[in-house]
Image (spheres, helix red, strand yellow):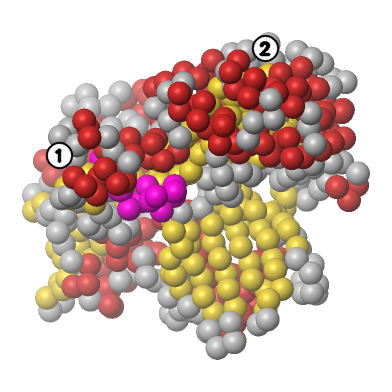
Amino acid sequence: MAVNTNSTLLKRLIQQSFIDGDKAQRVILEKSRQYRTLPELLINEKLINANTLHEVAASISNHLTLDLEFFNPASIPEDLRNEKLTRKSDMLPLSKRGRTMYLAVVDPTNIAAIEDFEFNAGMNAEVVVVHYDKLHKLLDKLFENAYDSLGGSEADWDLSAMGVVEEDEQADIVSVTPDKDDQPIIAFINKILLDAIRKGASDLHFEPYEKSYRIRFRIDGILNEIASPPVALSTRLSARLKVMSRLDIAEKRIPQDGRIKLKLSAKKSIDFRVSTLPTLWGEKIVMRILDSDSAMLGIDVLGYEPEQKQRYLYALAQPQGMILVTGPTGSGKTVSLYTGLNILNTEETNISTAEDPVEINLPGINQVQVNPRAGLTFASALKAFLRQDPDVVMVGEIRDLETAEIAIKAAQTGHLVLSTLHTNSAPETLTRLLNMGVPAYNVASSVSLIIAQRLARRLCPKCKQAEQIPAAELLRQGFREDQLDKITIFKPVGCDYCTNGYKGRVGIYEVMPISPKMADIIMDNGNSLDIATQAQREGINNLRQSGLIKAAAGITSLAEVNRVTKG
């Protein structure tokens, strides 16, 4: 359904000076093919807000308005539910009486779409005008469980806004041309991927078992089961995912790694990193969503406390030294590194990265995909970087002594080096380097800053509730006595807006600059406990203390702090 450029609603918005006519026409000319409806285009391109659009739409028609805030989607008759038609028109049949259906619409002047609904249902439409955001919130609720099985007809799956593409070794994009017999499987997989993006999942797990098959999303760090297709489809589902990832379908005995590019529109695509693993009952496939938007967030929204942010920015501003980001898999290390690289990414700076894999493409930065089979390791890439006049070097991970020694040499010879390690805290990172075999004087003279981090779920701002916790328990958890009268701890409740009381995630950080006294401890063969004690003397909050600050501010719950840090 094309955007209606002659819409009465658009004309009224221009006449009443809610939007600039010339600008609107230019945007519509450039962007109309990316959107299915005029309201979708106007709101997503920020030409107008949803509230103003609703007020104007209601004012130019004789139709009633309806607030969908508390409308129960379960009351919508099954025979009126048509996701394909609904999504492409911003309209939804709510109920019926005799030969009349009550149709919720955002744009009551879109007569062609209303007539499509009447023809499809074989009924007359009684129109009610609704708010764009509330309609789409209702649609997400109504269709969120539409993928629990492969039931229904292919016509019910709306794939018109999406295309699956693949990249070959020359980076040319080619379309996937599947066998016609596999269309139901293809449609199901595509809808699962779309649903994962819409729900904000970070990972998708496809898991075969003896008598069942499970699909789970990791949302805000927690796995949730979202579908359980018939186990007989296990082989076909894994085969489809492997075809999309350019993996060997016939090879089921060893793990494989691949990549998928999902094209959502002419200018929007999402990458998936794919890993297969042979298990007892088939191949388990895990897909990580690589969204470049997450790397462009900016340091202010990552959750750093003001003094932590200043320490990170100060280290980034230095011409040389090593910044290490540490934490378990899935703790946000990549986003922290890319955020720093974005700050450094200017015309005057030569930045090179060695990554395995290259998760997010950053224009202006020379990114190298490590390929150990071909001899391109982190160490060999680093050696090459140092021959190419670098200013900033990023190494995806320091895994061995050779990589560590080259990175430290670079940090000592006028280069800024960023990298990651897998340790539990900032002080343990230093002892990890020493245990690798790096001399103590090299560690003390090259490492300038260590960031240890975790990701905690944010409390939902709409439903969180204050929690009464005894003072003795707060003291046991780590709060100081002088804080008890000033803090309010909140707990998750759960509502339609969130997942089990949480919405999104926030970083918890330990940002530790290497001070002269810490360098002395390293040179004297001190251990991680000695360094942690000195960090406390210098006023550096560890992960636990930083988590308690977030709980005291009502950003996360005490239970969540206990989950991601040592309680």
* Position in image of residue 171 (x %, y %): 76, 44
Q: In this view, does 32 lie to the left or right of 21?
A: right
Q: Mark 1 points at which residue?
A: 55
Give the extent of the magenta segment.
554-567
* Position in image of residue 543 (x %, y %): 45, 38
Q: Mark 2 points at which residue?
A: 319
Query: Quadrant of the rendered structure where residue 442 is?
Result: top right
Residue that appears at 84% across and 36% down: 402
Q: Is residue 525 left or right of residue 405?
A: left
As helix, strand or loop, the secondary structure at mark 1 comes to: helix
Q: Tell me: residue 250, above or below residue 530.
A: below
Between 93 and 340, the residue placed more toward the observer is 340
Observer able to see residue 111: no
As helix, strand or loop, the secondary structure at mark 2 comes to: loop
Give amino acid for label 1: Glu
Query: How packed is label 2: few (under 14 Cα within 10 Å), some, or many (20 or more)?
Result: some
* Position in image of residue 274 (x %, y %): 66, 58
Query: How packed is label 1: few (under 14 Cα within 10 Å), some, or many (20 or more)?
Result: some
* Position in image of residue 198 (x %, y %): 43, 54
